[in-house]
Image (spheres, rainbow, N blue to C red):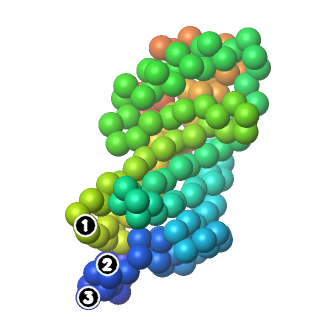
Amino acid sequence: MALSEHYLEADDLHPIDLVEHIAEHHAWEFDRIHDDQIAMAVEGQWRTYSITLAWSAYDETLRLICTFDMEPPAERMPALYETLNVINDRCWAGAFTWWAEQNLMVYRYGLMLAGDQVAGPDQIDTMIGAAVAACEQYYPAIQLVTWAERTPEEAVQVAIGGAYGRA
């Protein structure tokens, strides 16, 4: 059953209600933090990602942040920032940033729904999937720059090389 089949007549549903339904559909662990916010854990190939979606009625935006923890060495920070710039030039739907105080790599995306627009469950599911896919794609590049002391260009080439299958 498609995610949207259950909500064909439910245009007045809160976006976070839809996210909760999607999390249940995928059997993801989640916590409804507030009426306007939900947090969940989504398993990827490289790691488990923490994803939070929050609805802001003020600016009619559904905000997504997808995070994973890391502790890069201080001497590798300039290369990490350069890598994030290169990666963000390739990400059209969202952007990566480093939150030093929390030791978190963050992928952010905002879906603007101004004028009483409604996001459908398939659209929200795609948004979450795209965030995880971006993190999965660029995780190796971030690790190569941080721990293998590769240049940003070398690391990103590995990420965009696109392997097929599994070894």
Q: In front of the other: label 1 or label 2?
A: 1
Three-letter amino acid code at disc 2? Answer: Ser
Q: Secondary structure at mark 3?
A: loop
Crowd rating for badge 3 (residues with CA inside 10 Å; few <14, some 14–19, many 20+): few
Query: In the picture shown, does residue 30 fall above or below 114?
Result: below
The reply to whether dot 1 and dot 2 touch (C-beta < 8 Å) is: no
Task: Examine the image and state in which quarter residue 81 appears.
Answer: top right
Q: In front of the other: label 2 or label 3?
A: 3
Task: Examine the image and state in which quarter residue 164 appears.
Answer: top left
Crowd rating for badge 2 (residues with CA inside 10 Å; few <14, some 14–19, many 20+): some
Residue under pointer 3: 9
Query: 152 and 148: which one is in front?
Result: 152
Q: Which of marks 1 and 3 precedes in the sequence?
A: 3
Query: In the picture shown, does residue 137 fall above or below 145?
Result: below
Residue under pointer 1: 117
Query: 19 and 114: which one is in front?
Result: 114
User: Residue 31 in the image: x percent, y percent?
Assistant: 65, 71
Residue under pointer 2: 4
Q: Secondary structure at mark 2?
A: helix
Q: Which of marks 3 and 2 precedes in the sequence?
A: 2
The reply to whether dot 2 and dot 3 touch (C-beta < 8 Å) is: no
Three-letter amino acid code at disc 1? Answer: Gln
Query: 141 and 19: which one is in front?
Result: 19
User: Residue 162 in the image: x percent, y percent?
Assistant: 42, 34
